[in-house]
Amino acid sequence: MIKKDKLRDYRYVLLVLYVPLYFVCFFLIEKLVPSTADYWVSYCPLDDMIPFSEYFIIFYYIWYALLFAVGIYLMIVDAPEFKRYMYCIIIGFSFCVVFCLLFPNGQNLRPETFPRDNVFTDMVRAIYAADTNTNVIPSVHVIGAIFAAFGLCSTKKLKHRWLKPAVIVLAALISIATCFVKQHSILDVFAGIALSAIIYPIVYIFIKNRMKNS
């Protein structure tokens, strides 16, 4: 029988319960701000210079696997880093939910027709159908990708050094992919980077120091 003290040591695993809670909140807000509603439009002239490319949808989908893989890896090999990773996700994603609830926003960049018809455009159609063009700023994809890279680069448990620069490149590709598949404006990317820059010192300096002293 597992001792209570041992169970207490693994309480950090409960942080993963935030993930289904976030998705419930996200889809509720999606219903509250439908694509036909009036919302502030996220747009920048730079968006017109970014062509639609369905091939970047691969990196858009990889985001889900990346966040899951980094979370599971850190949960198993580096509990303190896992907690910091989850704190970043919780703070960042929760801010986005509250912000979009208080400030309805969306983008009008999706193409009316696709220039080609292939498996990649089918994947884009699937994303468009599952996720509306509202609630886009800051980009959760950007925030999640950045903190997945931070989490993997911060752990000292990782033996394969090449994975750290690889995950940084992957996070960058995921971030720009949101613009190439016209799921986000470049403004959403900039806002995601800015929010991540604010959250990072809160978690990796302030909370980290409190964890050391506790």
Image (tube, rainbow, N blue to C red):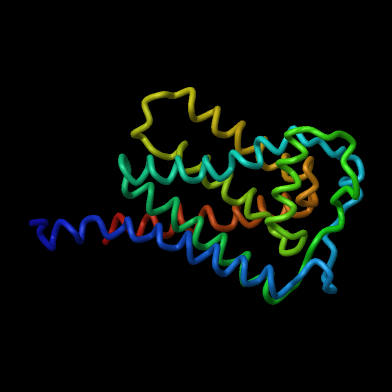
Quarter of the image holding residue 6?
Answer: bottom left
Quarter of the image holding residue 118?
Answer: top right
Residue nearest the viewer, comparing 57 with 92: 57
Quadrant holding the N terminus: bottom left
Q: Is residue 39 above or below residue 44?
A: below
Q: Is residue 58 above or below residue 96?
A: above
**Residue farthest toward the left in the current orientation of the protein:** 1
Residue depicted at 42% across the width and 46% down the height: 71
Residue nearest the viewer, comparing 166 with 36: 36
Residue 102 is situated, as x and y percent measured from the top left of the image, at 69, 76
Residue depicted at 13% across the width and 63% down the height: 4
Q: Is residue 208 above or below residue 104?
A: above
Q: Is residue 140 left or right of residue 12?
A: right
- Looking at the image, how many numbered discs can be counted on the residues? 0
Residue depicted at 66% across the width and 42% down the height: 60
Residue nearest the viewer, comparing 110 with 96: 110
Q: Is residue 99 left or right of residue 87?
A: right
Residue 73 is situated, as x and y percent measured from the top left of the image, at 38, 40
Quadrant holding the C terminus: bottom left
Residue nearest the viewer, comparing 30 with 198: 30
Q: Is residue 125 left or right of residue 63?
A: right
Residue 133 is situated, as x and y percent measured from the top left of the image, at 77, 59
Quarter of the image holding residue 98?
Answer: bottom right
Residue depicted at 68% across the width and 54% down the height: 139
